[in-house]
Image: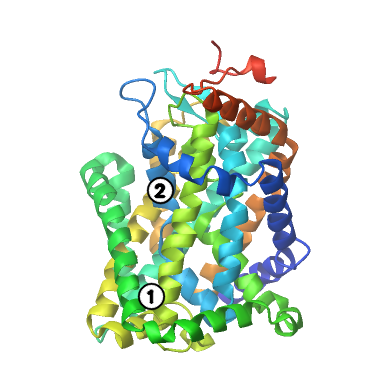
Amino acid sequence: MIDAIDSVVNEISGVLYQPYVIPLILLLAGIYFTFRTNFLQIRLFAESFRVVGERPVNLGATSSFGALMVSTASRVGTGNIMGVSTALCLGGAGAIFWMWVTAILGGASAFVESTLAQIYKKRDSDGSSYGGPSYYMQDAIHQRWLGIVFSIVLILTYVVGYNMLAAYNTQDTFSVFGFYDKASTPYIVGGVLAILFAFCVLGGGKRLTKVTEVLVPAMGILYVLVSLAVVIMNIDRLPSVFSSIFTSAFDFKAIFGGFTGSCVMMGIKRGLYSNEAGMGSAPNAAAAADVSHPVKQGLVQMLSVFIDTLLICSATAFMCLFSGVEPAAEKAGAAYVQSATMTALGEFGPLFVTVAVCLFAFTTLIGNYYYTEGCLRFIMKREPGKAFMMCFRLFATFLVFIGAVLSAGLAWDTADLLQALMVLINVPVIVILTKPAIAALADYEAQRRSGKNPVYDAKSNGVEHTDFWTK
């Protein structure tokens, strides 16, 4: 039964990831937004660091940094470790180059979608804000049905696809230890993850969530430092590592001989899974930020993409490639990372990776779930009832457990398929809605040049009927 489902999922996913579908959409959209914003990834990179430290307009509201942490908690997860390992093993060293390309171009896409989420955000009863792609589909292009479809796909992507995959990757990281038993360990790890997840989403885990908010940034910094240590210890491999990356990245005969398994395809797939640029997920967090101008949060979300891929994913890639252990298809996933860190760092390596994966996975599960409740609210046009939410949370908990015991193929293929559907819906919409985002960018830069702290006014920027942004 599982094999039959995986076969169908893989078949559909194979069509969507043909070079003329998802890869073409992502790359063309990224190039388009890069030119329309006049290369803001480069021009306003320093500005993105400045605005991330700004305090919210209203005391007690969600800051830019707070919204960044929610989206980064979802982005920085098992994909930064297992996803990169899988890409290197199945696509070759050149996959990391195409992950970099996806991130750099995707930064412009992330800016546009998050700026739009801010422009069209809704006011809650307590004065705070919420929103996301479903709302700009409803209010900007007046297609509520499309917003409902997107909300359903997002819920499936995060509760079914990504959370099951995070659970699978977490249990897989224990496979190198002597106590690992394929017949029982996945169930034990899945059970522990499900209990911790339920503890948080059912209302009792605020203290645990706050602890992880401190631990994960700390672990992210430590992870980059450990990777840097591996590079320095093996600095003599620098020429050969970069040679293999660029040689593999531009081996066009191999790429087009089998595109679905090529470094380009694996780089795009795993880059998208990791940084989510253009998918329409991060705008749900971006809409909650209390800022004086939508562009500020757009810049912050652009920065989040760079943190995720150019920093954390590169750390994994370099840690593996500089270890001297060659990537191979049979090592895809935990095995390659664990083998590489064992070679480079001894017994400390696999233990460190396991701890990092567990922490990243836990915050990924919570961050992913955060997005889904807002989508339920959009679909139902009200706050869901307590009984309904209890059932939904228990179902989400059950799926976390199921994910840990799935096969690797089905876990990855399901996530790939669902994220592709999100891209198919969201990217065309943000291309249609480019004008208000570009107008907001021009307004922001004009105010900055005149020495002002930019404040957005919707009407003067040609946007009508918003809950916010009126002077």
Q: Nearer the viewer, residue 345 or 420?
A: 345
State which quadrant residue 126 falls in.
top left
Name the residue beneath numbered marker 2: 367
Q: Nearer the viewer, residue 160 or 448?
A: 448
Mark 1 residue element: helix
Coordinates of residue 310 in the picture (x, y in percent): 48, 61
Tell me the tag on residue 172: 1
| Above or below 261: residue 35 | above
Q: What separation in Å lies between label 2 and label 1 (alpha carbons)?
A: 21 Å
Identify the residue shown where x is 52% and y is 46%.
302
Question: Would residue 74 be found to the left or right of residue 139 on screen?
Answer: left
Q: Residues within 10 Å of mark 1 (few under 14, many from 20)?
A: many
Q: Quadrant of the N terminus?
A: bottom right
Q: Amino acid at mark 2?
A: Gly
State which quadrant residue 55 falls in.
top left
Identify the residue shown where x is 33% and y is 59%.
220
Question: Would residue 232 be found to the left or right of residue 237 on screen?
Answer: left
Mark 2 residue element: helix
Question: Would residue 388 be found to the left or right of residue 9 on screen?
Answer: left
Q: Nearer the viewer, residue 260 or 254?
A: 254
Q: Are marks 2 and 1 in contact (CB under 8 Å)?
A: no
